[in-house]
Amino acid sequence: MTFLTRLKSTAAAVAIIGLAAQPALADIKIGASLSQTGPASFLGDPEAKTLKMLVDEINAKGGIKGEKVELVMYDDAGDANNARTFATRLVEDDEVVAIIGGTTTGTTMAMVPVAEEAEVPFISLAGAVVIIDPVKKWVFKTPHTDKMACAKIFEDLKARGLTRIGLISGTGGFEMSMREQCLKLAPEYGMEIVADESYGPKDADMTPQLTKIAGVAGLQAVVNPGFGQGPAIVTRNFRQLNIQVPLYQSHGVASKSFIELAGEAAEGVRLPAAALLVADKLPDSDPQKAVVVGYRDAYEKATGSPVSTFGGHAYDAFMILVQAIERAGSAEPVAIRDEIEKTKGYVGTGGIVNMSPEDHMGLDLSAFRMLEIRNGDWTIVE
């Protein structure tokens, strides 16, 4: 059975870009497993579109040092078992030199053992700190961590004199990880967690949990670690209950789709997010402005869709990988890995990246901007 025949027999294998079209030109093969469909598709779809756009762009300019790039991309639909299967296929059958993906923490963590065992560099697009802490030799990530998001929120709360916090968290991998990080960090920032509620991925009404939280005496703010539709429901229920304290969301909702889903209830919600969301509002002196404006304009021209933070994670992963290959002068996985780890001063959509053997993400809190939703749009509040 040929490779293409096997793919045709696998319903979940949705997209292979460039493989059939230009096999003779494909010299550097990069793999990806993303959640283009399923509950995390609002994350994975812009990631996939970004990778395709960048591969087309780089090949139009002659590739990497004259070698064309081939992208082998699968849709894991947010299923961890699919992600592990596709990661195995990418290293064993497709023989890629590096992998981008793992849209969610769950799919990423399913792919990690495959990359580590095969010794293939793997750049995740998911948020949980557990992906790179502890450091894994072959695993890197581009998004800010959940730990950073908690720290940024707590900094803002502290500046506002608010310390009595209610948590309402989703039960997915990212949400539970961020909840855990918030609980760990709270004492460091002088925060008191006075309520701690959760909701399931299919819950359509969080009124009972929010009613409990609102009933706690002295409540000063509510923080919601979550992504997908859950935070939009929390936000709508929060306003319906007329809870009169600030509501914070995570960077997991940093897309216009959240504002659309939450509607007017989103007014006043704060969240830490990347500069990409406020590209036009950045001062010209901001080192990220040219990058985020350039990516946004290219993405929106290529896709006709508004840009999101999540596509930016794929942009940064691809550019870090390409620059590593260029510096290495080689497409050997070990040489690529070593150069990714040496990434210094990379100005991306997520911030300025400085990696090291001890830090496989390379971002600090300055990479986050605290935003507030006003009049249906993002506003910088710091």
Image (cartoon, rainbow, N blue to C red):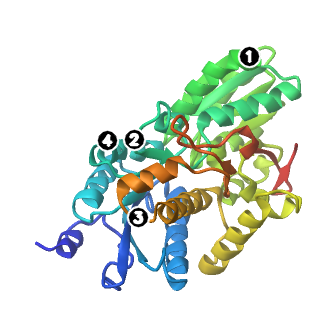
Real-space Cα separation, disc 4 to disc 2, in angstroms: 8 Å
Real-space Cα separation, disc 4 to disc 1, in angstroms: 43 Å
Say if residue 237 shows up in the picture.
Answer: yes
Q: In terms of depth relative to the viewer, which is nearer, 193 or 181?
A: 181
* Nearest to viewer (mark 2 / mark 3): 3
Real-space Cα separation, disc 1 to disc 2, in angstroms: 36 Å
Q: Position of residue 64 (x, y in %)?
A: 48, 74
* Nearest to viewer (mark 4 / mark 3): 3
**Mark toward the start of the polypeptide (4 vs 3):** 4
Badge 2 crowding class, 10 Å Cα cut-off, few under 14, some 14 to 19, many 20 or more, is: many
Q: Is residue 260 left or right of residue 20?
A: right
Identify the disc placed on residue 216.
1
Q: Which residue is under mark 3?
A: 330
Q: Which residue is under mark 4?
A: 113
Secondary structure type for disc 1: loop
**Mark toward the start of the polypeptide (3 vs 1):** 1
Real-space Cα separation, disc 3 to disc 1, in angstroms: 59 Å
Q: Position of residue 280 (x, y in %)?
A: 83, 64
Q: Position of residue 340 (x, y in %)?
A: 50, 52
Secondary structure type for disc 4: helix
Q: Which residue is under mark 2?
A: 109
Where 184 sits versus 129, above or below? above
Real-space Cα separation, disc 2 to disc 3, in angstroms: 28 Å
Look at label 1 and name its amino acid.
Val
Q: Is residue 78 left or right of residue 358?
A: left
Look at label 3 and name its amino acid.
Ser
Secondary structure type for disc 2: helix
Quadrant of res 19: bottom left
**Mark toward the start of the polypeptide (1 vs 2):** 2
Do the numbered discs 2 and 3 sit on residues whose CB atoms are within 8 Å? no
